[in-house]
Image: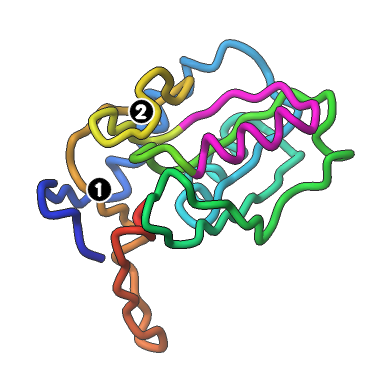
Amino acid sequence: MFPQPDLSQEALNWDDIDKLIEHLMPQFNSEYDGLVMITNGGLIPGGILCEAMDIQNVHTAAVHLQKSLNDTMAWPTFMQFPNDSLVRGRRLLVVDAIWARGRNIVIVKSRLEAAGARVETAVLHYRPRSSQFPDTGPDYYGAITSNYIIYPWESFTPDYLAPHRFTPSELD
């Protein structure tokens, strides 16, 4: 994984993740009917929050944005997404690791709201300087950063997996 050239790297350990979750937990002021984890970054923090909040109704959303000359015009492809009937009328928490550009979480939130869900968003890190949505941000976040974050689950590479080098378009 390579950071964007203008960002400093910050590698986190599991204790850092615990502290971010501890900071997030008191921010939630109500219960949720379910949680939607955005793959891949939101799987681990989403799983931790599900356990901590005793949320049983768990979904995943996988969004792929085609590369285009103008990133703001990329049309999303949903590789995985909960059926509308599973989210209609429900209060959902959408979780990802980071709001960098914000595209994935905004796309997921918008599609869930179009299906009739009431949605709030949570991330471990919020990077407002790189957000493509200057008038909005996550409802809840563990910390604000201007760094390129390397989460502990990203640095784990078993011998049987070849390392994957991310392109800048994959970092959001």
Q: Which scheme is used to colour this image of the protein?
A: rainbow
> Vertical placement of 121 versus 42: above or below?
above
> Vertical placement of 145 versus 66: above or below?
above
Which image quadrant: the N terminus? Answer: bottom left
* Residue assigned mark 2: 142
> Vertical placement of 170 versus 138: above or below?
below
Q: Residue at x 36, y 58 (%)?
A: 169
Pick whichever, 94 or 142, lies toward us: 94
User: Could you tell me the amino acid type at mark 1?
Assistant: Ile
Mark yes or no: residue 19 visible.
no
Q: Quadrant of residue 30?
A: top right
How far from the left and from the top, in percent, is residue 70? 38, 50
Callout 1 environment at 10 Å: few (<14), some (14 to 19), or many (20+)? Answer: some
Residue 146 within the magenta-colored segment of the rendering: no
Q: Residue at x 80, y 35 (%)?
A: 87
User: Could you tell me the amino acid type at mark 2?
Assistant: Gly
Q: Give the left or right position of residue 118, taking residue 172 as reference.
A: right
Tell me where the magenta segment starts and ends, as one range.
Answer: 104-122
Q: Residue furthest bottom?
A: 160
Callout 2 environment at 10 Å: few (<14), some (14 to 19), or many (20+)? Answer: many
Pick whichever, 56 or 133, lies toward us: 133
Q: Earlier in the sequence, mark 2 or mark 1?
A: 2
Marking on residue 149: 1
Q: Quadrant of residue 21?
A: top left
Q: Give the left or right position of residue 126, taking residue 60 as reference.
A: left
Helix, strand or loop for disc 2:
strand
Residue 106 within the magenta-colored segment of the rendering: yes
Q: Give the left or right position of residue 72, taking residue 31 as reference.
A: left
